[in-house]
Image (spheres, helix red, strand yellow):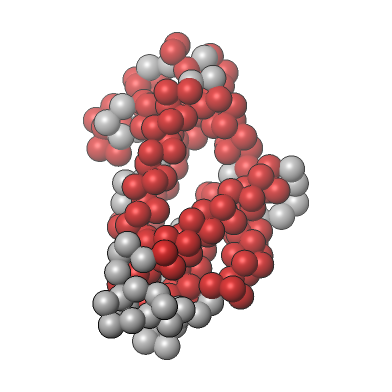
């Protein structure tokens, strides 16, 4: 395993998935999304059609690029953080661990994906729905770590504010290719983190007081 605990098999899977996403976005930007087939995407990524369907159920999913394992993986990191780590710091570390080299240096691909998705409002709405599902998993993990109810405001605020910070960082990143996305996300999280770094006092029922 590497220093992040990711196995060789996991890295290979991540690289294959990233290659398929790149192929989908680039072909869609060049030819128009409706004129691209799964067969062409697989050929562009130098894999079989069967391999494509091992990662995505359709080319829609490949364009959106949402990893169904990301939410559970991030939630697991939050819960597995050391005993002395605050819920906010566990959340922050989990977010930053998801920003791999492909994403750090994938500004051009991100801009192309945004361009294609803006032409397909139906797929854009699906992307938002996928994000909402992942955010709920993370909020539940933060609540568990903080000893709060899943309906409490604090975990939802941590994750909601974190998502807003991520979006602001991505917007800034889109304007400047001289900085890594991970650095911007870390800075954005730190800017609001002071106010959320500590779990507020709560009663025996798990609600904040």
In the image, taking residue 67 as reference, residue 191 lies left or right, namely right
Residue 38: tell me if it is visible: yes
Whether 171 is drawn above or below 190: the answer is: above
* Residue farthest top in this picture: 35
Residue at horizontal 54%, vertical 31%? Answer: 113
Q: Nearer the viewer, residue 164 or 15?
A: 164
In the image, taking residue 205 as reference, residue 183 lies left or right, namely right
The quadrant holding residue 3 is: bottom left
The quadrant holding residue 156 is: bottom left
Residue 44: tell me if it is visible: no
Whether 23 is drawn above or below 77: the answer is: above
In the image, taking residue 130 as reference, residue 117 lies left or right, namely right
Residue at horizontal 71%, vertical 55%? Answer: 179
Q: Nearer the viewer, residue 139 or 37?
A: 139
What percent of the width, then of the height, locates residue 199? 45, 78
What percent of the width, then of the height, locates residue 150? 30, 64
* Residue farthest front in this picture: 209
The image quadrant where one finds the N terminus is bottom left
Numbered marks: total: 0
What percent of the width, then of the height, locates residue 53? 26, 32
Residue at horizontal 41%, vertical 45%? Answer: 131
The image quadrant where one finds the C terminus is bottom left
Residue at horizontal 37%, vertical 60%? Answer: 138
């Amino acid at each position: 395993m590497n220093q992040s605990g990711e196995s060789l098999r996991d890295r290979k899977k991540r690289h294959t998935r990233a290659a398929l996403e790149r192929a989908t976005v680039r072909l869609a930007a060049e030819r128009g999304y409706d004129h691209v087939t799964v067969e062409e995407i697989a050929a562009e990524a130098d894999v079989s059609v069967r391999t494509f369907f091992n990662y995505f159920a359709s080319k829609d999913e490949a364009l959106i690029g949402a990893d169904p394992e990301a939410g559970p993986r991030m939630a697991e990191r939050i819960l597995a953080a050391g005993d002395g780590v605050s819920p906010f710091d566990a959340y922050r570390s989990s977010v930053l661990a998801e920003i791999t080299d492909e994403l750090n240096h994938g500004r051009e691909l991100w801009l192309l994906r945004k361009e294609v998705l803006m032409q397909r409002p139906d797929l854009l709405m699906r992307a938002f729905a996928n994000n909402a599902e992942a955010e709920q998993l993370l909020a539940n993990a933060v609540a568990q770590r903080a000893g709060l109810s899943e309906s409490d405001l604090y975990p939802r605020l941590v994750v909601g504010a974190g998502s807003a910070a991520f979006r602001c960082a991505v917007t800034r990143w889109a304007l400047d290719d001289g900085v890594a996305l991970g650095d911007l996300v870390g800075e954005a999280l730190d800017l609001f983190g002071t106010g959320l770094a500590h779990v507020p006092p709560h009663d025996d029922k798990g609600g904040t007081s």
